[in-house]
Amino acid sequence: MKLTRRELLKMGFISVAGTVIPLSALEILKPEAFASLKHSKKKRWGFVVDATKCVGCGMCVKACKLENEVPFESNVSRTWVERYVVTKDGDVIIDSPKEARYGFIKNDPQGKKIKDEDIVKGFFVPKLCNQCDKPSCVQVCPVGATYKTEDGVVLVDRTWCIGCGYCVQNCPYGARFFHPVYNTAEKCTFCYHRITKGMKAACVDACAFGARKIGLINDPQSEVHKIINTERVAVLKPEFGNEPQVFYIGLDHIVR
Amino acid sequence: MTHAHGELWTIKELFTYPNEFIYWTVHIAVYPYLTGLVAGAFVLSSLYHVFGKKELKPVAKFSLVFSFALLIMAPQPLLLFHLTQPQRAFNVFFTPHFYSAIAAFGVVFSAYMAIVGAEIWFAYRPFIVEQAHGRKGIMGLLYKTMTLGSYDLSDKALHTDEKIVKILAAIGIPSAAFLHGYVGFIFGSVKTVALWKTPLMPFIFLMSAIISGVALCIATYIVGMKLFKRTICPDTVRSMGKVLAGFIIIAFILESIDIVFHSYTAEEFWGILSVVLFERVAFDMFVVQWGLGMIVPLIMLLLPKVGTLRAFIASALVLNGVFVMRWNVVIGGQSMSKSFAGFMQYKMPIIPYNLETLREGLVAVIFLLVMPFVLLCIFNKILPVFPKRKGITASDIMTHMPLTVTTKTPVEEVADILVSKNISGVPVVDSNKKVVGVLSESDVIFRKEADSLTAKDIMTAPPVTAYADTSLAELRQIMADKHIKRIIITDKEGHAAGIVSRIDVVRAQEMGECQN
């Protein structure tokens, strides 16, 4: 067969186009783009925790476990509350018994009896996934089973996760674990199934004290936007470079 | 109640985040241990194939095949036991996410396997062809399949084989280094675990890999030769011992620099890290890993007159030390909470009582550590790795493919060749490349003075020749009977295949079977 240069160019063009067009479909079908297709127009979900308002009742943890079907009695949770107690001697005692799903009902940090007069400082800190802007968990997933949606929430595809645990190791905040039933990586989703339908996250609704707030960070009307832009807020472990998107009011230097 | 993954073997102390458990268990220690052995065994075989360390010849094929057996088992801790969804392991090939340090695992691993597999095939090709011709039944069929249709055993083909083995072994060294350095990177790049996060990690892992692999080859070689009642070559053991000692020094320096550096810079995690190092794993680390695993074996190997027993004990100590090192890194690293305010202890499940404790417990570990030896035994049945006890023949000791001159080469040129190549004799071939004579120094010195003499005029003809399968005893007899210094080895057509000189015979007598 004889080929002219024109024919060769033509065939080359057709084969390149034929390869690129189906491949570009993969871009559209990327889970991160697909999941947020309907909801995102440069939106960014964020969270504010006002630690000064938390009383350690644990209702948020309870609501989360029930809403998201993480077995209630299992010792893992998408959200939890930590108690910090500083004594006269300068000891810092931290605990989160059963993730605080039953709340803090006794003055017994780590099972120790401490007299009230020996306590110089004590407070609660609710924790959840920070939905980082640069999530190290997403970076290290070998199969791309975990991804950040375009509106900023990190999700896990339970049907694709191989369960290597690399993401669990790479989360600086201990937000990830294995789901006791599905045996795949599991984490807080900001209740993505609720917030994308105009509802609030389960923990936010369950908090009677207004310690938890969720909203769109870049929406000037939202409460989280106002707080982040007008008050002094801090994030956990900024030194890891993950750029967490859960902002705290009343964070203490002893909080890890 | 549904328990959380990791809960069955984790004991928490003080404050740890609720979701923290020892998620990477003993298998994540076994995995780098096995890859390390692969890399070390391969480097050992390459020292012969690439750098021509002759005293390592008796273990070159053995360590190569052993490396392959270990390589097959290396990913199994992950694929069979670690992944909570093992049936999805191949997702890594379908949708590799290359930002992840472990996404390239399949590619790196397969590439390395191809290199080692190919090298074994070329190294064993003559043997495979021989067996394919000689054996019947299933084994015959197996060998016939293994030839891949290549039956050419001419000198030229064999020479090409040798060259390819050398090239593959040379490519294999950086690949082995990459394979294991990569494993080190997988740990070193986890920024949340203070003990792992160091740019030295790939090098630390690589050096400990090499020492464990060499130690395993020494120990297995000694045991294997004893088992098959063959002669253990002292030079081979001593040479492996030297390689081991050299790498121990480098490994030790790297590991200690890492700790010194952490201690000196004393970043915020140093407080809890120092508790882990100096209290919780202190015995394992400073006594078992460094003392018994590096310093004692190093002294044993550096003292003069290293014997079989001492080499064996030193190797066993190194193997134990490196395993404990892997354990200390993997388990020790996770034992400090990310909250820097608590610890986790790992209790490996010994007696399984459900699927999880079977997969992640002692039973699985024993399976993983025994299988490489089982595979080695199976491979040994097909491709023998321990040198056979057999008489030494000319082909074992001759210089292969010697230089030749033709009958028409001028004498001056012959003299030049002898001087420049530093040899004392050279075969003379005719236009059909058949050997027709031999020229030695004395022929050149005591020649008649005449103009334009060629090799033909002064050579000793006919030459004394023998075949490659002539035994050492016969060669000695010929030299004694004919008062000659060298015998030309030819193939059946009379083409030169090699040359055996007196020094070759002396060396063969000295080293016995270890020459093989």
Image (cartoon, coloured by chain):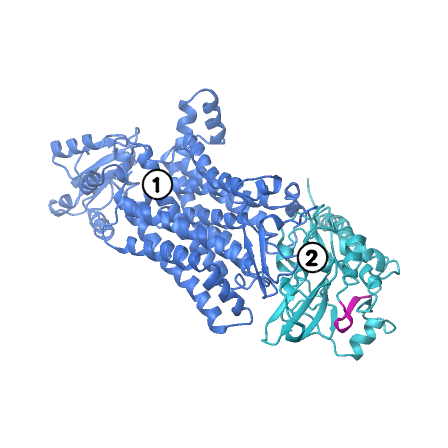
Chain colours: A cyan, B blue
Q: Is residue B6 visible?
A: no
Was residue A45 drawn as part of the magenta stretch in this picture? yes
Q: Residues within 10 Å of mark 1 (few under 14, many from 20)?
A: many
Mark drawn on residue B221? 1
In the image, which residues are magenta? A43-55
Residue B168 vs residue A139, the one in the foreground: A139
Q: Which quarter of the picture shows residue B268?
A: bottom right
Residue B371 vs residue B393, the one in the foreground: B371
Q: CA distance from mark 2 to mark 1?
A: 54 Å
Mark drawn on residue A98? 2
Task: Report the chain holding disc 1.
Answer: B
Same chain shared by disc 2 and disc 1? no
Residue A71 vs residue B387, the one in the foreground: A71
Residue B429 against residue B190 in the figure, above or below = above
Type of amino acid under label 1:
Tyr
Q: Say which quadrant the N terminus of chain A sits in.
A: top right
Residue B261 vs residue B148, the one in the foreground: B261
Q: Residues within 10 Å of mark 2 (few under 14, many from 20)?
A: some
Residue B361 against residue B289 in the figure, above or below = above
